[in-house]
Image (spheres, helix red, strand yellow):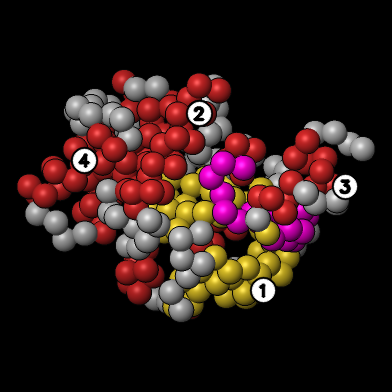
Amino acid sequence: MIKIKNISKSFSQKKEILKDISLNINKGDIVAIIGQSGVGKSVLLKHINGLLIPDKGSVYIDDFCINTLTFSELQKIRKKISMVFQFGALFDSMNIYDNIKIALDNATQLSSKDKVKVIKESLSAVGLPDIELMYPSDISGGMKKRVGIARAISISPQYILYDEPTTGLDPINTDKMISLMKKIQEREKSTSVIVTHEMRIINELATKIIMLKEGKIIFDGTPNELNSSSDKYIKYFISGQNR
């Protein structure tokens, strides 16, 4: 379970990005974090795995307050968490095999033989078999995102964090990405947190929606509740019609 209690974050004295944010994410939830650009969605996501530390408040993963842990203690918690970055975040100097292996090296005690097996299985799961020896420069942007997901699931995480997984994809590849995320959710039975602007993720995949505005949560509920909201700002956001 993830618990975020009254966190605030600023990057300068004049710019407070998150303002007293609190929320709970239960086991098995698929949470979409939505809102306009610049409201702090990715900043909030990065607090969940300790990439950012709040100025105030606390972040709990399975009852551990991660912003008070030592680095070695935090690393143990991070072994439960995978993050899929917006543009894949692959190492250009490494082939696909080594890009996935680095996650296994950091988070598991698998033998070399078992790592080979897991890497092949993870790539097959995202529809990219037999590309282990290729490099990021050899594959498309959509494929890089799928390799990022393969790397994420290779460690069998309890939590998967996605930062804008469909950004830059055309409609066909967006559809493939959403189908893949559904398949991964069914396979891993993990808890997922997704920063997104994609309404299809909100309506077809998410079980819970968190909406941010000006650094605060203005909605916390189900997709049905979001779509039936009478709030003018929410209606404008989801329909694009300012009425």
* Circle nearer the viewer, 1 or 2: 2
185 left or right of 156? right
Q: Earlier in the sequence, mark 3 or mark 4?
A: 4
Q: Residue 203 is drawn in which quadrant?
A: top right
Q: Secondary structure at mark 2?
A: helix
Mark identifier at residue 175: 2
Kindly report the distance in space between the C-alpha atoms of the residues bearing marks 2 and 3. 29 Å
Amino acid at pointer 1: Asn
Q: Position of residue 33 (x, y in %)?
A: 62, 51
Mark identifier at residue 121: 4
Q: Residue 189 is drawn in which quadrant?
A: bottom left
Q: Earlier in the sequence, mark 4 or mark 1?
A: 1
Mark identifier at residue 232: 3
148 left or right of 121? right
Amino acid at pointer 2: Asp
Q: Are marks 2 and 3 in contact (CB under 8 Å)?
A: no
* Nearer to me, 16 or 208: 208
Amino acid at pointer 4: Glu
Amino acid at pointer 3: Lys
Q: Which residues are magenta?
A: 203-220
